[in-house]
Amino acid sequence: MAAVAVVLLVLGAILVPGWMRSTQIAEPPAPVRLEPEITALGGSSAPSTAGIDAALAEPLTNPALGQFAGIVFDASTGEPVWQRDAGTSLVPASTGKVLSMSAVLLGLDHDKRFSTKVVRGAEPGSVVLVGGGDVTLSALPAGEESFYPDAPKFDDLLAQVRAATGGPVTSVRVDTSRYSGPLLAEGWLPEDIPGGYVAPVQPVMLDGGRADPKVNYSPRPPDPALEAGKALAAELGASSVSAGTAPPNAQVLGEVKSATVREQVETVLRHSDNLLAETLIRELAIATGHPPSFAGGTAAVREVLTRHGFDLTGVRLADGSGLSTADRATPKVLGSVLAAANAPATPEGGLPERAAKLRALLPGIPVAGGWGSLDDRFQGTPGQGWARAKTGTLSGVNSLAGSVLTEDGRLLVFALMSNGTSPVEARPALDDVVDALRGCGCG
């Protein structure tokens, strides 16, 4: 048998074609080296007031701007280089979120998360759904994303409760005592709730109270916390649902946690989410010793911004979202906050503490013609992709606050406010102003 094996091996060697025996595998090519780098911005000359005046002369003649006020900062210095009535108090609409979310980032731990708990109730067979400041808890099943990124799942909370109850559940209480005061702000319209712009501000609900968890402006109920309690009762087989408070030191049967403060602020700014803005300023109020209400939340915003050096002259806040027609702000303060957020790093790469905290504003600022609340604007215009701005729109109120990279490489920060004309007219007019800044040599 050994001899046969040798013969076969020899025959195999003979039968292999010569071209196969002589073929060699080539050496692999040298690896491609990617060496990305971040280079400093800076044009040939610093922007000047005269240069910006010249660039904006034509777009500012548009009567669609109504009562207009604005300011432009050179981001490299943090100093204003152009302004028109920048200290005038106007209704900001959702650009007011720039102020409230800046205060949140300055006053809260960016990695903080908020809990929703179910605890054992005082009576046998009862449980209490305890609101901890998270309105993003999602009723969608695993694998489906709601409007809120990284939202905790109601099913996860439910599974924990079922495993921990050890018996039938007959009643569900809903504890909303974390927040106080009115559920709706001064200057909110009653139709804002069924219209889906906001929900009554409570510390627990499913999917922000939205009828459709995946749609921003989806109708909301008048008592979203109680609706969450009803959903829990239905799953646990409880026959009774009512408002109540948790017993002291009650046993925790289940707990889930929200996305971080940083992530929630990004969602607020990108999609102009009113409800999330209101809950975050209440959490800021709790952290700073104010009542967790509209009055306490806005007082906390003022306190934190003032402590960090911002001049709030001309600012009046009735809410944290800018949905209220009673809000007032100035281009000067909006621009000052964004200039601080865009402050350049030192040659060593460091940032002052204030600027370092406010940097977290920037990822959520919508991109012109790209995503967020500017996705349908600036299409095919000079500012598309080069401008980023928080929008603000109410009836007769239009505003933009953000930054734009000019064609010669200078980063300008701007705050533009218009009151008295319709969004259909004013929004394109504001966009034209930003487009002019994009094309501005401004030296």
Image: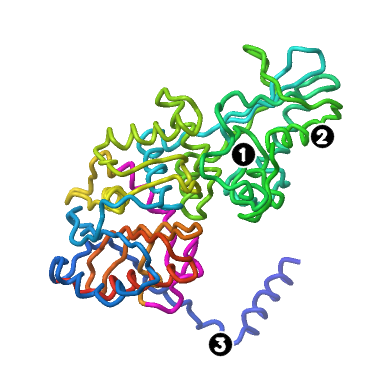
Give the residue type that dot 2 points to.
Glu
Closest to the camera, between mark 3 and mark 1, is 1
Q: Name which residue lies at 64% across and 39% down.
A: 137
Q: Regarding mark 2 in the picture, which secondary structure is present there?
A: helix
Q: Name which residue lies at 71% across and 47% down.
A: 140
Q: Regarding mark 1 in the picture, which secondary structure is present there?
A: loop
Query: From mark 3 to mark 2, how far is it between C-alphas?
Result: 75 Å
Residue 299 coordinates in the image, percent (x, y): 39, 32
Residue 139 coordinates in the image, percent (x, y): 71, 43
Residue 403 coordinates in the image, percent (x, y): 32, 61
Disc number at residue 235?
2
Q: Is residue 31 visible?
A: no
The numbered mark, 2 or 1, whose residue comes first in the sequence reads 1
Query: From mark 3 to mark 1, how far is it between C-alphas?
Result: 83 Å
- Which quarter of the rendering shows the C terminus? bottom left
| Residue range (magenta) | 356-381
**Foreground residue among 408 and 280:** 280
Is 174 rendered above or below residue 412? above
Residue 45, picture quadrant: bottom left
**Foreground residue among 304 and 429:** 429
**Foreground residue among 253 and 102:** 102
Residue bearing mark 1: 200
Does 357 lie within the magenta span? Answer: yes
**Foreground residue among 358 and 96:** 96
Residue 89 coordinates in the image, percent (x, y): 33, 50
Residue 206, picture quadrant: top right
Closest to the camera, between mark 2 and mark 1, is 1
Is 279 rendered above or below residue 177? below
Give the residue type that dot 3 points to.
Gly
Residue bearing mark 3: 18
Q: Regarding mark 3 in the picture, which secondary structure is present there?
A: helix
Judge the density around disc 3: few (<14), some (14-19), many (≥20) Cα neighbours within 10 Å: few
